[in-house]
Image (spheres, coloured by chain):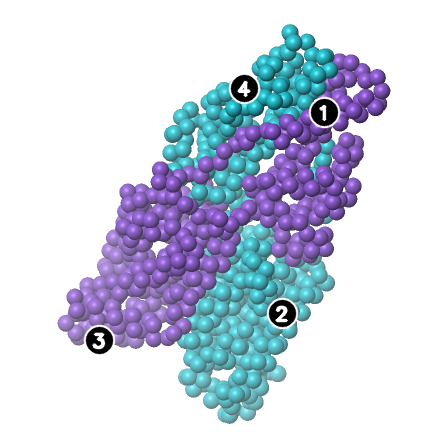
Amino acid sequence: MKKLFLIGFKDLTLMFRDRAALTFMLLAPFLLTVGMGFVTGRFSGGSTGLSDIPVVIVNLDQQDLGNALEELFNSEDLADLVEPAASSDPEAARRLIDDDQASAAIIIPAGFTDSIIPKDESNFDQSFVESEPVQIEVYTNPSRPTGAGIIKSIVDEFISRVEEGRTSGMTSMVGLMQSGLLDPQNLEAEARALFENVEETESTAITLKTNTEGTEAVEFDLLAYFAPGMALMFLMYTVSYGGRSILAERAQGTLPRLLITPTSNTQVLGGKVLGIFFMGVAQVGILILASTMFFQVQWGDALGVVTLILAAVFGATGWGMLITALARSPAQAGSTGSAVMLIFGILGGSFIELEQFPPFLQTISKITPNAWGLDGFTTLALGGTLKNLTEPITALLIMGAGLFVIAVLIFNRNGMVQK
Amino acid sequence: MKKILAIAWKDAIIRFASPSELLFFIILPIIFTFLLAGGTPQGDDDNRIRLLVVDESNTTMSGQIISELENSTAIRPEVTTRDEAQSQFDERRASAVLIIPAGMDIESLQSGSAEVEMLQQPNNINTTVQERAVLTAIRRVSSAVSAAQNAVVQREAKQPFDSDAEKQAYFESSLELAQEIQNDAPERVSIVEGTTPDQVEYDPRANSSAGQLITWVFIPLFGISALFAGERQGGTLRRLLITPSSKATFLLGTISGQVAMALLQMLLLVGFAIVVMKLNWGREPLALFVILLASALAAAAFGTTMGTFIKTEGQASGLSIMFGMVMALMGGCWYPLELFPAVIQNAVKVLPTTWAMQGMLDLVLRGGGLIDVLPEAGVLLGFAVLFFSVGVMRFRFE
């Protein structure tokens, strides 16, 4: 057992002496985590990365509803989300979008309010059809799809409220007229009263209960997803780097030397595996610690985090051994390791959440330690504990053990560590 | 010229000596483009955000809510069972689930007890859009009932009803009228996508295609540093000293060879995007060539400068991948730049990846031409001049 640990610690020490490898294993995932922090708004205090969406408003209506929409975009409620600018020229506003200066332009045409709030009796005729509805134009920037989508949804919601108010006002007016309870002399005044604040209509017939109103509202730190996502991606590089050392030692002749000492093949191979495992644990551990120190990431249950790191590194070590067993040279192991790192990174959800993939890719992602590891870290960040991690930990342990057995069979077949 | 070509050819042979290089040259870029483009589907496809809906009511009202959701421009409802929805939600494969509980009917709406429930993943950008769309849908379904109730109140204020039956009849006729008014309501918002007079067919997947192209071409170009470091470590640069070849010849040969390979890689990736993903890359071939060449030169120049600071090939390989990935992320190649805080959006203008991405988006998303990409190409060439100057000044054979 002592020999096993000695070989393992020797490989770990060598890794810490290799400044280039250390930079890649630690600095790269750390910097990418910082970048993801910016994207997700983690460092700007927002729940998402999107804030101060630039929008240009051209209010040619200058009446109740046009003004109400302009006020909505300038309201306190949307102060953090949007950054409105007023313009009086539709063409200039469109040019700003074409020049990528804003996410969208909202052009409220003249007569918009008049098209909704009726002025005379003809508008209450059920057979009355608006010849050409006056439409608000939302001119969107195709290269800012998210911001433009949010602007669209705000305008949609406003129109929905207006439409609701209009339906209510019209229904009341027509009903009263048909009942002969409306004095034609007072029609305009009555209509104004019924259509007053039409955009503020709030329907209460159906209420929406969101889960954040429930008892189990959870604050989820997005970095608790992306930081381990990046760490797990670069873990795949680390395990292949460790595996590469077996091939390098054989090429340099230090492996045969080790084999002529009173050390069994199993001890040598076990020591190398332990070395890879130590490297992985050190890498992920340092990254988790750094994220905690620099960004105050809330990881959840500490025992669960430690167990999950050990299981994830074990699963990844299995892959590292398989890559080593299949490679013919250290360079081949290196390039294959980098490729596997990137493929597992994207398949495992380090770049985009698995939800966005088609179902068959979500199934394929299960072969990666990244997907299981991230599943576990997310569970912990959402308030889970070690007992909720049975599935990912079991999967990672089975993955590691299974791949290790396959790697040993290939090693034996190739006579890699034969005396 | 012959020497320059010989050096470029030698580098190509060394680079492609291992078949695994093809992985990074074309296979991985295609896999990444394909997978990341999956998040931004093709224009013809339904690219609305998916919302799982559990209809436990199966009434006309619940049907109307689903129908309104189907009309949404932002979300796409997918009706499923509660178990399936809960399972997808728990596994974070669904960002939100809308549950319409049993008993959603006109009576529950009249009494104000009707309620729908929405499960939302925390801190998920899609849930904001989904919640707004659901509110719009239930408001539309509610509004007819609310309008009828309001009409009853208005009528009662003018003249009380003689009986409950009359009141109910008035409510029902008002509800019918309100639904009619609602159905006849015209579209009051038109969505126009920023465009050019020639009506280019835009596709948001172009964003992924351009971003991955930059990522996978910039990394090997930064790897020029590894070529220099490797030759210096192996002593082959010193051997060049005894040949009648100048420093400029060596640098030109190495850099032009890598830039030519980068252009080939770019053309293959653009070809893939045009043929397989049906993206409109080929609309302005000259502008495309200008921006691709300027991008390649800027990246090659950065790699040259890196090569004069880095001592070993191992260091160079790791740092090339690290700089490539970080610059791609921060330059908006993986996620739209609009998601970054304003201060970062300005700060990342010092990166060549930001300008390369903007230039390519001008072409494929904003329908620009040669004139439109000239500013970005100019900045990229400025980067190239700056970094080549530093690289050439610092370059040593030993």
Chain of the residue on which disc 4 is drawn: A
Name the residue tied to disc 4: A114
Q: Secondary structure at mark 1?
A: helix
**Where residue A68 sits: x, y (%)?**
56, 24
Asked whether B386 or A225 is in front, the reply is A225
Observer-side mark, 3 or 4, equals 4
Q: Residues within 10 Å of mark 2 (few under 14, many from 20)?
A: many
Name the residue tied to disc 1: B174
**Where residue A15 sits: x, y (%)?**
48, 72
Q: What distance separates the C-alpha of mark 3 from that of mark 4?
A: 84 Å
Chain of the residue on which disc 3 is drawn: B
**Pointers 3 and 4 in contact (CB under 8 A)?**
no
Name the residue tied to disc 3: B239
Chain of the residue on which disc 2 is drawn: A
Observer-side mark, 3 or 2, equals 2
Residue type, label 2: Leu
